Image (cartoon, rainbow, N blue to C red):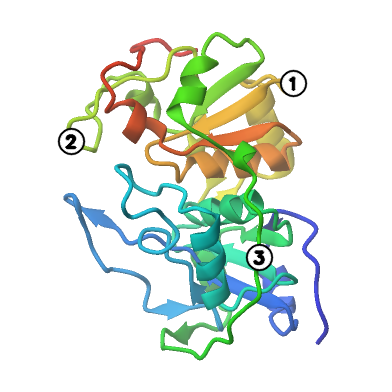
Amino acid sequence: MGEVNISMSLVEVEWLKEHLKNDNLVILDATLPKAIQGDVSKDLPVRRIPGARFFDIKSIFSDTSATFPNTWPGEDVFNKAAQKLGVNKNSAIVVYDDLGIYSSARAWWMFKAMGHTNIAVLNGGLPAWSRAAYDLEEKTTIEIKQGDFAGKYNPDFFQDHQNVLDHLSDKEQIVVDARAENRFLGLVEEPRKGLRSGHIPGSKNLPYTDLLIEGKMLDLAELKEEFYSKIPENKKLIFSCGSGITACVLALAAELSGYQNLSVYDGSWTEWGSIPELPIEKGEKT
C-alpha cells in the first residue's frame, strides 16, 4: 500500500485505521505493567491493535543496572532493541499504551532523541481504539524480520541532576514538574519509600493529567491556553515527574503547543528526592 510519512506527533485512531496497511508502518505498544505495592505485576492487556509489537520500557528500553527506574539505556542498546522489533530507518511509527497517553509519550521521546521524527503517539491509545470498535487481536508471538534502525543519540533531549542543579539560577531555563500538586507541594508522602517530599527549587507545576480528558490530549486551543497561562514560551524547558515517564507527556504537549528547546530530566524526582545534598522546596506553588 506504499509508505507513509507522519508529519505530526499525535494521530487519531481514525488515522491509524486508515493507514494500517501501509508498508512501512510499525505499531508499538509501550504499555507499562502496573506497580502493585512495590511489585511489578504482569497485568498487561491481553489484546492489542493488530500487528502491534511490545516496546518494553522497563526491561529492554531502560538501563536495568541503573540505580533509578526508566533510565536512558544508551544508543547501542536502543538501536539493537529497536531492530529486534523490526523497526527500520524508514519506519513510520505509531506508539500507544493502555491508559490513553501515559507511557507511550516516553517511547515517542526516546525515538525523537535518536533522531527519528517519523513517529507519533496515538491519541487516546488502546481505550480510544477500543471505543471506536476497531479490531483487536489476541497477543500471540509474531515473527518479526530484523530491522535496520540506526539512530544517533542527541544528548540535548535528556538532562541529568548535575545539569539541572548547575542551572537552577538560570532565568532562561525552567523546570516543569508533571506530578500532582499535592506531591509537588510536599503535602503527601512520595509513593516510593524513602524519597523526600517537595520539588526542585524554582520549578513550576503542571500536572500531566491537566492536559488530558479521558486519556486524550486536550484540543490544541485548550492545550495552548493551559501552557501559555503558566509557562513562558521563550524559555528553555526541562520536564520532570516521578521517574521520567509523564515528563514526556508534558514534552509532547509542549511540542504540539509550539514550544521549542525542550528536554526531560531523566532521573526526575526519584533521583532528586533521594539525594540528600540536592536542595528542595515545599509548600510553594510557583
The amino acid at mark 1 is: Asn
User: Is 68 on the left or on the right of 17, as rendered?
Assistant: left
**Residue occupying image coordinates x 73% and y 33%:** 260
**Residue occupying image coordinates x 60% and y 40%:** 155
User: Is 122 on the left or on the right of 176, as rendered?
Assistant: right
Look at mark 2 in the image and give the residue it sits on: 193
Cβ–Cβ below 8 Å for labels 2 and 3?
no
The amino acid at mark 3 is: Ala
Mark 2 → mark 1, Cα distance in angstroms? 37 Å
Cβ–Cβ below 8 Å for labels 2 and 1?
no
**Kind of element beneath mark 3:** loop
The answer to whether residue 147 is above or below residue 180 is: below
The amino acid at mark 2 is: Lys
Look at mark 3 in the image and give the residue it sits on: 150
Q: Residues within 10 Å of mark 1 (few under 14, many from 20)?
A: few
Residue 271 placement (x, y as % from top left): 34, 32
Q: Residues within 10 Å of mark 2 (few under 14, many from 20)?
A: few
Mark 1 → mark 3, Cα distance in angstroms? 33 Å
User: Is 6 on the left or on the right of 206, as rendered?
Assistant: right
**Residue occupying image coordinates x 58% and y 64%:** 95
Per the rendering, the mark at residue 234 is: 1
Mark 2 → mark 3, Cα distance in angstroms? 38 Å
- Residue 111 found in image quarter: bottom right
**Residue occupying image coordinates x 28% and y 68%:** 43
Per the rendering, the mark at residue 115 is: none
